[in-house]
Image (cartoon, helix red, strand yellow):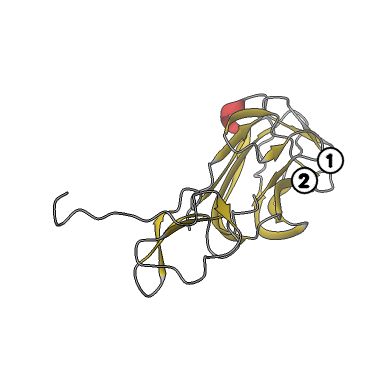
Amino acid sequence: MADNMKTHKIGVGLDPQAAAPSNPKTGDMYNSDGTPAIAGIYEYDGSAFRAVSNHTSLVAPSRYDTNAGQTIGTGATRIDFEDIDYDDDSLVTTGGSWVWTCPTDGTGKYIINSVLGIDSTNLGASASCQIEVVINSVAQARKDMRIPDAPGVDHSISIHTVQSITAGHTVYITLLCSDADAIALDINRLRNYIEIYRIA
C-alpha cells in the first residue's frame, strides 16, 4: 500500500448510532442517526468527529400541484395540492387536511414557494385575497393582494419565503378572499402548486 494511502477503521460499524462512540481512535467512523449530530457519516480526526458525508443534510424536495378547481370561501381555506410532482421522502399527506411534515432528521431552513391561480368567474370587483404559509398551525408568512376592478380577468397570487422548520412540524398553505361570493382556483396545475426544499 502506498505511504499516502489511509486505512479507515470502521470499529463501530455503519448502522445508525444514537451516540458518538467513546474513546475513538483516529480514522474511526460512525453513522449518526440524527441524535448526536446531523444524520450522516463522521470520521474521528484525532480531536473530534468531522462530517464525511451527511447524506440526509438535504431532505428530498417536495412539489405538488392541483387542477381540481378547489372552492375558496371567505374564511381561510387550506389548499389541497392533490397531485404529486415529486416527493421521494413521502412527506406529504393529501386531502382536505393537506400537510407536509418535516422528517425526524430534517430540522433546518427551507424555501417554500407557492402560486395560486384564481378563477374570476364569481369574483366581484375590488376583492382582496390573502395567502399564508402556516407552520405548525401558526401563520409565519402572509401576502395580500387587492384585485383591481376588472371582473372576468383571472389573477395569480404567490408567496416565497425561507423558514426555519423543526423536525415533526407541519406546513400548509391557506387562501382567503374578502369577496362575499365563494371563488375557486383555476383548473390549471401550472398555476397552482407548492414547492418545499431544504437549503441549510
Q: Is residue 50 above or below residue 84?
A: below
Q: Is residue 85 above or below residue 28?
A: above
Total labels: the figure holds 2
- Residue 127 visible here: no
Residue 8 in the figure: left or right of residue 76: left
Kindly identify which residue carries mark 1.
Answer: 73
Tell which circle, 2 or 1, labels the residue nearer the N-terminal end. Answer: 1
SS type, badge 2: strand
Task: Give the crowd class for mark 2: few <14, some 14-19, many >=20 residues within 10 Å.
Answer: many
Residue receiving disc 2:
177
Q: Is residue 24 left or right of residue 70?
A: left
Q: Amino acid at mark 1?
A: Gly
- Residue at image point 66% right, 57% down: 167
Three-letter amino acid code at disc 2? Cys
Residue 113 or 55: which is nearer the viewer? 55
x, y percent for residue 49: 42, 67
Of residues 126 and 22, the one nearer the viewer is: 22
State the separation of the CA atoms marked 2 and 1: 7 Å
